[in-house]
Amino acid sequence: MSGEVLKGEGLTVRDLRVTFDGFTAVDGVDLDIRPGDLRFLIGPNGAGKTTLVDAVTGLVKATGSVRFGGDELLGKPVHRIARLGIGRTFQTATVFEELTVLQNLDIAAGAGRGPLTMLRRRTGVPESVTKALETTGLTELRDRPAGVLAHGQKQWLEIGMLLVQDVQLLLLDEPVAGMSHEEREATGELLQRVSAERTVVVIEHDMDFMRSFARSVSVLHAGKVLSEGTVAEVQADAKVQEVYLGRVSEPEPAAVPVAEEA
Amino acid sequence: MTVVLNQSFTGISIGAVLLLIALGLTLTFGQMGVINMAHGEFIMAGAYTTYVLQKSISSAGASLLVALPLAFLVAGAMGALLEWLLIRRLYTRPLDTLLVTWGVSLMLQQLARDVFGAPNVQTAAPDLLTGNISAGGVTFANNRLFILGLALLCVLGLTLVLRFTPLGRRIRAVVQNRDLAEVSGIATGQVDRITFFIGSGLAGVAGVALTLVGPIGPTMGTNYIVDAFLVVVVGGIGQLKGAVITAFALGVLQSVLEYSTTVSVAKVGVLVAIVAFLQWRPQGLYTLRTRSLA
Amino acid sequence: MTTTLTRLRVPGAFLLGAVLLLGVAPLALSDFRLSLFAKYLCYAIVAVGVSLAWGRGGLMVLGQGVFFGLGGYAMAMHLKLTDAAATGEKLPDFMQLYGTSDALPWWWEPFANPFFALAMTVLLPMVVAGVLGFFIFRRRVKGAYFAILSQALAAALSIWLIGQQATTGGTNGLTDIQGFFGYSLDDPVNQRMVYFIIAAVLLLLMALARQLFVSRYGELLVAVRDSEERVRFLGYDPANVKLVAYVVAAGMAGLAGALFVPAVGIISPALIGIVPSIGFVIGAAVGGRASLVGAVLGAIAVAWAQSTLSDAFPAAWTYLQGLLFVLAVGFLPGGLASLWFVLRRRRTRPTPVIRTEEPVAVTVGETA
């Protein structure tokens, strides 16, 4: 099932560095994320995961190189990077609370609209929006203001917004934080569906979630890539066990994982 | 050469007045994010405090000395009351505080008109502060020197309080992370009120100083308030040194422009310079850098 | 779901407004009251723009006096020149009084042309707003900074005008305007004509603003107000979104200023400084900044209260005005219009979309 036809562009990061007032948050990261990957970025707090995503999406200044398809991303303003097909979510779901689910998605679909379309009223629902409503299971709620959605539903709406935006690369910052078990499962399956056609990068703390759904994993520690590979490879890595997994997975026998990789 | 020196001194003394007024704002606007338009009326309250004192204590020098702490208390109390009554309900809507406090400012101005009358009043300056000192061809007006000294003293005092007292640590903690401060056991509401008390009190002190250089009237605050806010905008949020540098820089710029053009053109010039500056540093001269989205 | 009734609600309300403004008011009001009403409608035109930029876009536009003034001066300069020409003079009256030279300043010259002057009443404010907004929004200057800079601009313009007495009339402003494109403003019939023009412009601009509100642009503007950063990650440049609202609001304020001149016969620095600039938003705040009709009615009501009460009870009016700011903005951020929505919500489904920075009265009810 792992899909021969991989759509989307890959992300290539070389020697990425981000410094805040003398503190180096990302310290020479190299990453290669193939098209169609579902990559998890894990690491202890302060490892530089979110900062890495911030740098890729143009929110913080960085040195080095980040290439997506044929384009160098560093130095481009945020909205230009977004238009190249890179979308992200935030740790706390940020949707437009005063607008309905439908309006949220419609705005996400419209970055390329011309002024004349913008000045007219929305008539009907764009096809990509209908599709995203179905994919995220929000069709029933489309006329609700986003502000009244449950936490998990907001996260799904955010992912749906990335889908109608038709991004090729989704960068998700802790998408299942604070979700119930069922919501996690649903989100994981959603991510697997999404990654059939796009590249997905997930920052995550939840190890069970990672084991269930990751196709590949990068472990960050103190601003550097400590280890990279499949879930099994990473968990077998002594360095990783030392700084991170060792403590977390202590109760379980070291070799447990990964049987469920589909 | 003396022209340049004289002009620089004029600029520095304009800057000192700006600094004195803006100092309170660095706390209430800079640290707490509240746009308090009634700050100008706290200045007015300080000035009227001096006026009332001088009527009861005939010595100009003594009344000025008593006025400084008293005006601090009067304006500070007004500020704390305002914070308690209105502003604490509006911390989540900083822009709306601007309009609400503008309403308060209108009412306070009218109150001053009802109590003291609409026309401006004057206080007599102590003899010591009426003369000039000349050095190297440059004339220093004593009252201007006094204001400069007072401004620097206030900066020093405020720095010491913020840096070395438990109160100062609490203030900075609340500014940097309100939620964290709260769960660490700091009564943030109380800290807010005290911060506001000090910030407004400093406006009162500025009001005392202004009686030395101009008339006292119900609308005197309005003339200074926007300029004072601009000082904090350019200086950046959360650090005193930004306000100090900016106040003197704007003062000198203003006086140079006034000298080479006219007062009104100078105003426009300063504003253009500020917008240009913000192109370079949109957050102001100094700023606390954080990663948060907000 | 959309019954015929709800579909006709907006056009119906618009028609009702037109009948009231163009039919009932001119019949019911005396010449004097009608010309006062014309003045209030000018403030209402400014409020239409304020509702767009502030109510929908979250931009604290505290410098609308600048744009009102630019439009007003552009119009007044033309009318002063035609007044002077009508009496065979080369210079407007105040220039003969205070002026230092016999020649018209070069920047006055083009305003002799009516088309140029009319275009400038709208274009000049829009260009100034465009340039200022471009520089401020591009660099993501904070909302509070924007509010303060707007005020500083209003202060600077009025101080500059006062300083240039020989060419701008200084503190007095441009006064004693006699004619309006060849019609004498002393004639009550022509005053009524001015009223009709103002009322028609107000209705037109409300229709325009309404279209902007319900358009995709309007939805995007609300999105920018609520989470600018998120919009950026969707591939829009929020600076442009805000710029459009700011420039349109400036154009409306300019037009209002231009129409104010024939209605009242004067434009002066006192009408455009910090104090009147803040005054321009209070009507919108009282009525409901995010509601077009609320903002317009609020502006008219506050202007009416001001001119009715401020002469008779100046002190009481100032207290009342201050109290209005405190109560309306502090405790009813959705304005009186939000009360309307609260009442309506009981009967119909919740209407979303109106919010200040935090959830307030107008937000949707179901979570509560």
Image (tube, rainbow, N blue to C red):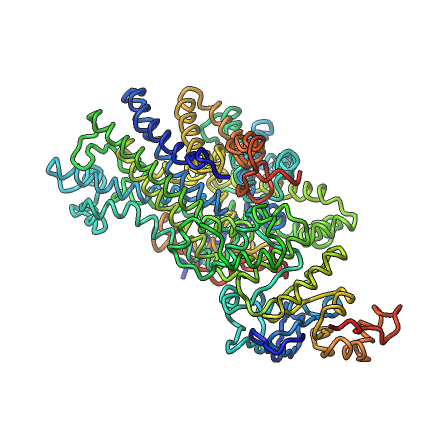
Q: Is residue A3 above or below residue B254?
A: below
Q: Is residue C207 above or below residue C40?
A: below
Quadrant of the drawing holding the N terminus of chain B: bottom left
Q: Is residue C318 left or right of residue C114?
A: right
Q: Is residue A130 visible?
A: yes
Q: Position of residue C333 (x, y in %)?
A: 55, 37
Quadrant of the drawing holding the C terminus of chain B: bottom right
Q: How many marks?
A: 0
Question: From this viewpoint, which residue is outermost toward the front?
Answer: A1
Q: Is residue B290 above or below residue C331?
A: below
Q: Position of residue B289 (x, y in %)?
A: 62, 61
Q: Is residue B56 left or right of residue B142?
A: right
Q: Is residue C20 left or right of residue A253?
A: left
Q: Is residue C151 visible?
A: no
Q: On the image, which quarter does residue C301 sit in? A: top left
Q: Position of residue C361 (x, y in %)?
A: 59, 36
Query: Which residue is nearer to you in this view: A118 or B62?
Result: A118
Residue beneath the point at 40% across and 39% down: C48
Query: Which residue is nearer to you in this view: C106 or C292?
Result: C292
Q: Position of residue A198 (x, y in %)?
A: 59, 70
Q: Is residue B283 above or below residue C359?
A: below
